[in-house]
Structure formats: C-alpha cells, structure tokens
Amino acid sequence: MTWLRSFIFALGQWLFTPVFCTLILLTFPLSQHRRYSIISIWAKTMLRWLEFTCDIKYRVIGAENIPNQPCVVLSKHQSAWETLAFQKVLPPQVWVLKRELLWIPFFGWGLALTNPIAIDRAAGREALKQLVSQGKDRLAKGFFVVVFPEGTRMPPGQNGKFHIGGAWLATHTGALALPIALDAGEHWAKNSFLKTPGTITVSIGKPIDTQGMKPDELNKQVEAWITAEMPRLKSL
C-alpha cells in the first residue's frame, strides 16, 4: 500500500509539474511578490496532494515566533518536504541554493523565477560576498531568506556540519535569525521513492537578534538549539 500511495503521488507530480512550470514562464513580467504568490501554488498543491495520496500531515510548533519583519531562516534539512511546506508555513521567501539546481528542466526554470540566491559554492570568499549582496536585496524587498546550514539533506539521527553562510548573511545584514527544527525525514527520506504516513513536526524557535554577533557565535547558537530540539519533536 505504501508503494502504491507513493506511486500515485509521484505520477501526479510528474504530470502536473511540467505543465505548471511551462505556464508560469508567463509570469516573468510580473512583480517579484506577485510571481512568488503564483509560483508557490505548485508547492501548496503538491503538499495537499501528498496528504491526500500518502497521508502525510504536519503540525507547526512556535508559529508565533515568526517575526513580522523579513529575516534569515536557518533550518534543519532532512527531506524535499520542507521545500514545499515552508511556502505554506512561512511568509514569502527566497532560498539560498547551489546554482546547478536552476539548470533542471521545468523545475529549475520555475525556481529561477522566484529570484533565489544561487551561489557557486566553489567561489569561496567571493560566494560570501554574493550572498550578502543578494541577501540584502531580497530582505529589503520583503522576502525571508531560507538557508539550510548543513547544505544537504541529512537522514534522521544524523547531523551535518553547519556551514557559515547563513550565519554570515544574518550577522552582516543585521537581520534576525530564525532557527527551525523538523523531522520530515521520518516520512519522506532523502532520495526515497517511498513516503510513509504520519505527522511531521516543525518547531520554530525564538528569533535571534544578530546585532553585534560574530558569524561563528550565531552558527554555534543555532546549531545547539536545533540539535537539542530534534530529540524533543516527538514529545511536543
């Protein structure tokens, strides 16, 4: 039954995505916020389709901690699920991502229209300059900036190295940092076709004032909070 449910979800995704991503190319002349509101329909539709086909629900703890002003989101990354759900849970946002993702047919084209901060990870210090420059622009335009500090999806129970980019952006722009823990990998694992029924928990921590903080200090604080929060998610 799990395999069949997963297949039906994937089939719907395969059929819907190319058509939708082709149509949203027509949104190019619109404002960035208007484009985002249209493009995010894809993610919200897939989230509902996932619940309908695979019986994967979610709950959010700490939604009251989401600030009214644009901030830098520093989140645990376990699954493709959060790239869908954050477009429902959080205000309008852009992501910091590797630029190669923009080359994926259909999906990458639609992603490019959301004005992500696409970084060449091999560029070193220059990449950090690009991150701050583009991050200031997106924050000034009213977008939250979503960063996955571990850089890749980590299986449940495993922690990756927290890279400095997200903390660097927050401290160099003076934006609030919003830590998020989640357990999406329990139901939609990295690179897994199978999706198991259940409820994903998203825990949003209190925003951190980054004024006067060093990137390393912020990075350690966020990592410590997420690491401590992860085992608590099942009991929340």
Image (spheres, grey):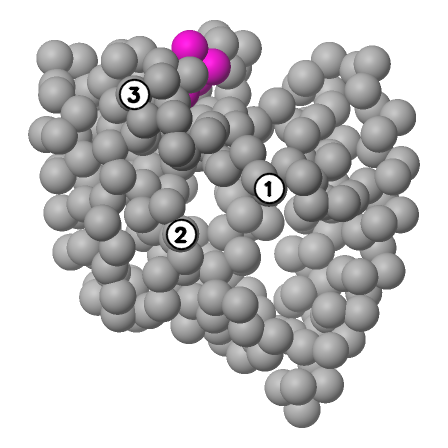
Alpha carbon separation for disc pair 1 and 2: 13 Å
Q: CA distance from mark 3 to mark 2?
A: 20 Å
- Compared to residue 236, the image places residue 76 above or below, namely above
Q: Which residue is mark 2?
A: 152
Give the residue at mark 3: 125
- Residue 67 lies, in percent from the top left, at 37, 25
Span shown in magenta: 131-136
Q: Which one is earlier in the sequence, the residue at label 1 or at label 2?
A: 1
Magenta-span inclusion, residue 16 = no
The residue labelled by disc 1 is 101
Q: Main secondary structure of the magenta part?
A: helix
Considering the numbered disc 2 on the image, is that residue within a helix, a strand or a loop?
loop
The amino acid on which the numbered mark 3 sits, given as a three-letter code, is Arg
Which of the 4 quarters of the picture holds residue 167? top left
| Callouts 1 and 2 close, C-beta under 8 Å | no
Can you give x and y, in whole percent of width and height, for residue 214 in the image?
12, 21
Q: Residues within 10 Å of mark 1 (few under 14, many from 20)?
A: some
What secondary structure is found at the residue carrying circle 3?
A: helix
Q: Going by the image, does 150 lie left or right of 22?
A: left
**Does the magenta-highlighted stretch encompass residue 133?**
yes
Q: Position of residue 107 (x, y in %)?
A: 72, 45
Q: Is residue 155 visible?
A: yes
